[in-house]
Image (cartoon, grey):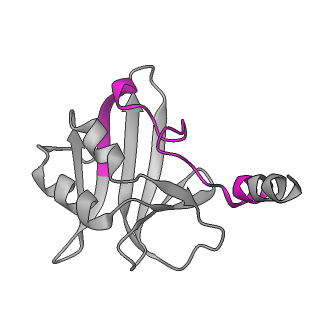
């Protein structure tokens, strides 16, 4: 019993998240996603907005867990999920160099999902260029 309690405490401390965790927005709450993305092969910054495929996009980040020791990862971009109630959930995305997506929400870093799936989804979803301010 004591070992089980210790294991549960360790899981809480390491920040394991299930795919049903409320940290990421629910796709039904999303109105649009505004992207700032650094795209190969030139790695130029691109701005665009998408108005659908939210569930597919969010699934590329799952499952995930807290990354207690973030590395100096390359920035891939920022996904600003604009919710129907006006809130914005901003997710900074990094290339973790191990095939997983590294991302930051607020001041916490996470790792999980699949960078290749994220890139595949990004290449297939319809995009509307975001006007530069």
> Residue at the spot x=31%, y=65% of the render?
115
Residue 131 visible to an observer of this rendering: no
Q: Residue 1 in the image: x percent, y percent?
A: 85, 52
Residue 39 visible to an observer of this rendering: yes
Most foreground residue, 120 or 21 = 21
Compared to residue 125, the image places residue 99 above or below, namely below
Compared to residue 12, the image places residue 100 above or below, namely below
Q: Residue 58 in the image: x percent, y percent?
A: 35, 44
Instruction: Identify the magenta region.
Output: 10-35
User: From the viewer's perspective, is 10 left or right of 15?
Assistant: right
**Residue placed furthest toward the front:** 1
Compared to residue 65, the image places residue 43 above or below, namely below
> Residue at the spot x=37%, y=49% of the render?
79
Most foreground residue, 88 or 16 = 16
User: From the viewer's perspective, is 66 left or right of 120?
Assistant: right
Q: Which quadrant is the C terminus positioned in? A: top left
Most foreground residue, 81 or 14 = 14
> Residue at the spot x=52%, y=80% of the render?
72
- Image quadrant in which you'd find residue 94: bottom left
Q: Residue 89 in the image: x percent, y percent?
A: 47, 39
Can residue 24 be found in the magenta stretch? yes
Q: Residue 114 in the image: x percent, y percent?
A: 33, 63
> Residue at the spot x=21%, y=47% of the render?
48
Q: How many marks?
A: 0
Can residue 23 be found in the magenta stretch? yes
């Amino acid at each position: 019993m004591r070992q089980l309690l210790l294991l549960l405490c360790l899981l809480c401390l390491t920040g394991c998240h299930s795919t049903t965790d409320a940290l990421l927005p629910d796709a039904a709450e999303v109105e649009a996603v505004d992207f700032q993305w650094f795209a190969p092969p030139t790695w130029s910054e691109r701005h665009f907005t998408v108005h659908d495929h939210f569930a597919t996009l969010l699934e590329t980040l799952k499952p995930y867990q807290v990354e207690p020791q973030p590395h100096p990862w390359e920035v891939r971009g920022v996904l600003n999920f604009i919710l129907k109630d006006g809130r914005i959930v901003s997710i900074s995305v990094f290339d973790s160099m191990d095939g997983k997506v590294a991302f930051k929400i607020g001041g916490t870093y996470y790792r999980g999902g699949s960078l290749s799936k994220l890139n595949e989804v990004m290449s297939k979803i319809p995009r509307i260029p975001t006007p530069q301010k």
